[in-house]
Amino acid sequence: MSAYIIAQIRITDPDEYQIYLKGFMPIFERHNGALLATSAKDIDVIEGDWALDRVVLMQFPDTAHARAWFNDPDYTALARHRHASAQANLVLVEGIGD
């Protein structure tokens, strides 16, 4: 069953964040990840509160692939740039009806 990671992000250091972005896709694709949506502009909160100003929606074949990506040593090293340049909240959810 597909799994999804939803990320809320607020970039605080765009130059440092670019280092993260440059290395992101090769590692992400190695774990069969697919980007479904990303907000380069302001998001439109239509109900309730949204903690941060950007969002990324990622899809993986299953939760095992998602966790393997997140725990990949190459990604862990790269994520240091994200930690230094942005606030983020990430959640992992399982799809329905696959």
Image: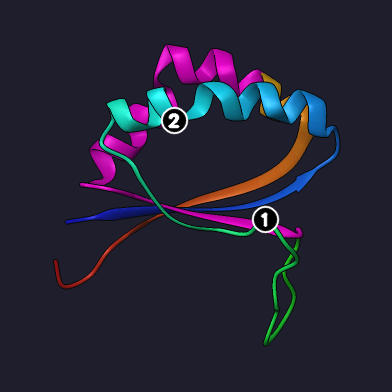
Q: Which residue is mark 1?
A: 40
The image quarter in which residue 48 lies: bottom right
Q: Give the mark count.
A: 2
Q: Which segment is the magenta one?
A: 52-80
Q: Which residue is mark 2?
A: 25
Find out whether residue 58 is within the magenta segment: yes
Tell me residue 49's x, y (percent).
75, 75
Tell me residue 64's x, y (percent).
24, 37
Find out whether residue 87 is within the magenta segment: no
- Dot 2 crowding, Cα within 10 Å, few <14, some 14–19, many 20+: some
- Dot 1 crowding, Cα within 10 Å, few <14, some 14–19, many 20+: few
Tell me residue 45's x, y (percent).
70, 79
- Secondary-structure class at tag 2: helix
Residue shown at 27% from the left, 64% from the top: 95
**88 vs 12, nearest the viewer:** 12
Amino acid carrying mark 1 in the image? Ala
Q: Is residue 10 above or below residue 94?
A: above
Q: Nearer the N terminus, badge 1 or badge 2? A: 2
Q: Is residue 11 above or below residue 81?
A: below
The residue furthest right is 12
User: Pointer 1 and pointer 2: residues touching (CB < 8 Å)?
Assistant: no
Left or right of 43 in this view: 95: left
Residue shown at 75% from the left, 62% from the top: 51
- Secondary-structure class at tag 1: loop
Left or right of 63 in this view: 85: right
The residue furthest bottom is 47
Residue shown at 30% from the left, 53% from the top: 3
Distance in Å between CA atoms under marks 1 and 2: 16 Å
The image quarter in which residue 73 lies: top left
Left or right of 97 in this view: 75: right
The image quarter in which residue 21 lies: top right
Tell me residue 97's x, y (percent).
16, 73
